[in-house]
Image: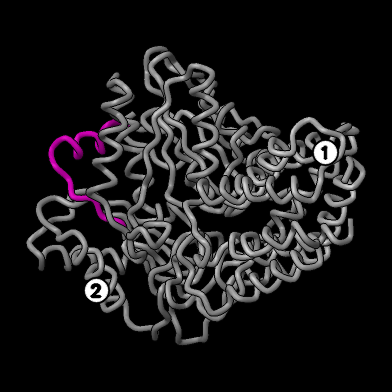
């Protein structure tokens, strides 16, 4: 295993120390593993807290700042945070208007955030939780853990964060978060597995011409294995899956996301194909992100996340944002 | 069974989880995200420290401290699930110096119910419940029988299709692999024999 780390057990604290040094706009509590805005809570503003396993950077800590999150709780690599982190973060960001928990739909994240929310409520805090579950590769039924939360988490954090910044009350911010999730879908493809530092070897093995379809963001294998093929076909495969679940129309926000080890050049190749696909369906990619935003350590591959926009969502997307991972308008 | 018994039990679990750490992680690599052994080892190491620093005086204190520490240190799904199991055991045995086999079996039955509720899982979903549930009726008679039932239960998860937890994302591809959560649960129950 060749990784740019010191000791395996220090990966998360070392990452946090580096983020603190690089971004004075953040206040990083390395010991308790909480990343906050240096400016502290904004009085009267709904606080936004998210969190999840480490290894997805810039998600979530890289999205702490004006217009997005107030706090992030990074867990161990690919392991959800513990309730103590979420409780401390919730207290720290409560500006008197309540706190929104943005939770990716994984059993671990759900359970730990649930426990934290219950304890916060017992202490009198006003907390509402919203689940993000955008991954169409997973069958959503009572017989599964439900769809995973992946790329749409960024969209939810951005648009709910913008609405909170404009002074909306907790119920409205939560409702917007649910709307964004309901209009968003994701599909991921892996070319190679990733290596969790503590495990020391790849989470699965892929042959030289094989790919995994329908991967999540934790290095778990996907729904099926297939043969590698040209970008046009791979994008069509992913876009067909998204379109079958929620047909494209009108204005679309698109994220072509690298999983950590895919060249930006190739992501642009994919974006060109996405743009053409949408035109073919009579829809328009009016806003986009191309790059590494919701990663999976050193996995090679990409995911596509789309959100059907309306005027309100577009204006929330365009609202100024100033975080280490996203910045415009300020 | 007194406080010393429960301390020995947790010590054996800690030792076995450490010894089986890579095996559990390998099972999780096949159908999860390759960290189950790593996470449980981190959790029980923290439990070891918490118990050493506290010198608990009752069985309930041992169990509750174990559960609370797992919730605070492990993360993922296994932290809250194992933590809730041990905390429920502690609450159920109550403030007594000695716990009978029947009382422990009853406590485990309550723990099972709490884990099923928290994880919204049933027997046969390919989770830790598949090792826990069959062991409980046997516990009233012997820990050997309970350990056998738990190990059989864990092995019997291999042909199952996962319906809960991270393995469920694999759908049909989860078939043919033993569930890491059921495997670690069998270690926990098997350790009762050695306590």
According to the image, label 1 marks what residue? B59
Residue at the spot 38% in from the left edge and 46% down from the top edge: A153
Residue A288 picture location, percent across and down: 27, 51
**SS class of the residue under badge 2?**
helix
Q: Secondary structure at mark 1?
A: helix
Q: Is residue A235 above or below residue B77?
A: below
Q: Position of residue A182 (x, y in %)?
A: 25, 47
Residue A313 is inside the magenta segment = yes
Q: Which mark is residue A216?
A: none
| Rendered-image quadrant of the C terminus of chain B | bottom right
Q: Which quadrant of the structure image shows residue A46? A: top left
Report the residue at 52% width, 60% height from top.
Answer: A218
- Residue A77 vs residue B105, the one in the foreground: B105
Q: Which residues are magenta?
A: A305-320
Q: Residues within 10 Å of mark 1 (few under 14, many from 20)?
A: many
Q: Residue at x 86, y 39 (%)?
A: B98
Q: Which residue is mark 2?
A: A236
């Amino acid at each position: 295993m060749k990784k740019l780390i010191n000791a395996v057990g220090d990966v998360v604290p070392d990452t946090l120390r580096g983020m603190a040094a690089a971004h004075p706009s953040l206040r990083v509590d390395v010991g308790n593993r909480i990343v906050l805005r240096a400016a502290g809570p904004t009085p009267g503003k709904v606080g936004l807290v998210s969190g999840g396993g480490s290894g997805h950077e810039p998600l979530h800590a890289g999205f702490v700042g004006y217009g997005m999150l107030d706090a992030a709780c990074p867990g161990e690599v690919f392991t959800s945070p513990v309730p103590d982190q979420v409780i401390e973060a919730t207290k720290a960001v409560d500006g008197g208007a309540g706190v929104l928990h943005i939770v990716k739909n994984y059993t671990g994240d759900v359970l730990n955030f649930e426990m934290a929310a219950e304890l916060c409520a017992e202490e009198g805090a006003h907390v509402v939780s919203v689940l993000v579950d955008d991954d169409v590769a997973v069958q959503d039924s009572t017989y599964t853990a439900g769809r995973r939360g992946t790329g749409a988490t960024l969209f939810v954090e951005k648009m709910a964060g913008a609405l909170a910044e404009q002074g909306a009350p907790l119920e409205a911010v939560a409702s917007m978060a649910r709307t964004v999730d309901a209009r968003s879908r994701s599909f991921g493809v892996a070319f190679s597995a990733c290596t969790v530092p503590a495990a020391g070897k790849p989470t699965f093995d892929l042959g030289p011409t094989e790919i995994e379809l329908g991967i999540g963001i934790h290095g778990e294998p996907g729904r099926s294995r297939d043969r590698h093929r040209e970008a046009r076909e791979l994008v069509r495969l992913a876009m067909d899956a998204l379109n079958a679940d929620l047909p494209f129309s009108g204005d679309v926000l698109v994220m072509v996301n690298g999983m950590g080890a895919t060249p930006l050049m190739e992501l642009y190749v994919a974006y060109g194909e996405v743009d053409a696909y949408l035109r073919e369906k009579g829809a328009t990619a009016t806003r986009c992100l191309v790059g590494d935003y919701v990663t999976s350590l050193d996995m090679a591959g990409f995911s596509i996340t789309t959100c059907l926009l309306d005027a309100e969502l577009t204006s929330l997307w365009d609202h100024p944002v100033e975080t280490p991972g996203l910045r415009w308008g300020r | 069974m007194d406080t010393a018994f429960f301390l020995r039990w947790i010590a054996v679990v800690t030792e076995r989880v450490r010894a089986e750490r890579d095996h559990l992680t390998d099972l999780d690599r096949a159908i999860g995200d390759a960290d189950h052994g790593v996470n449980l080892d981190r959790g029980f190491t923290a439990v070891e420290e918490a118990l050493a620093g506290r010198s608990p005086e009752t069985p309930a204190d041992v169990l509750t401290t174990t559960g609370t520490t797992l919730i605070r240190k492990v993360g993922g799904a296994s932290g809250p699930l194992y933590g809730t199991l041990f905390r429920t055991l502690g609450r159920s045995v109550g403030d007594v110096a000695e716990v009978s086999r029947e009382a422990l079996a009853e406590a485990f039955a309550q723990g099972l119910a709490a884990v099923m509720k928290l994880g919204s899982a049933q027997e046969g979903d390919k989770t830790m419940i598949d090792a826990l549930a069959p062991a409980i009726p046997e516990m009233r008679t012997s820990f050997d029988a309970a350990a056998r039932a738990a190990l059989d239960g864990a092995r019997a998860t291999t042909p199952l299709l996962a319906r809960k937890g991270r393995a469920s994302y694999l759908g049909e591809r989860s078939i043919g692999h033993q569930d890491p959560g059921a495997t670690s649960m069998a270690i926990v129950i098997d350790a009762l024999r050695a306590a």
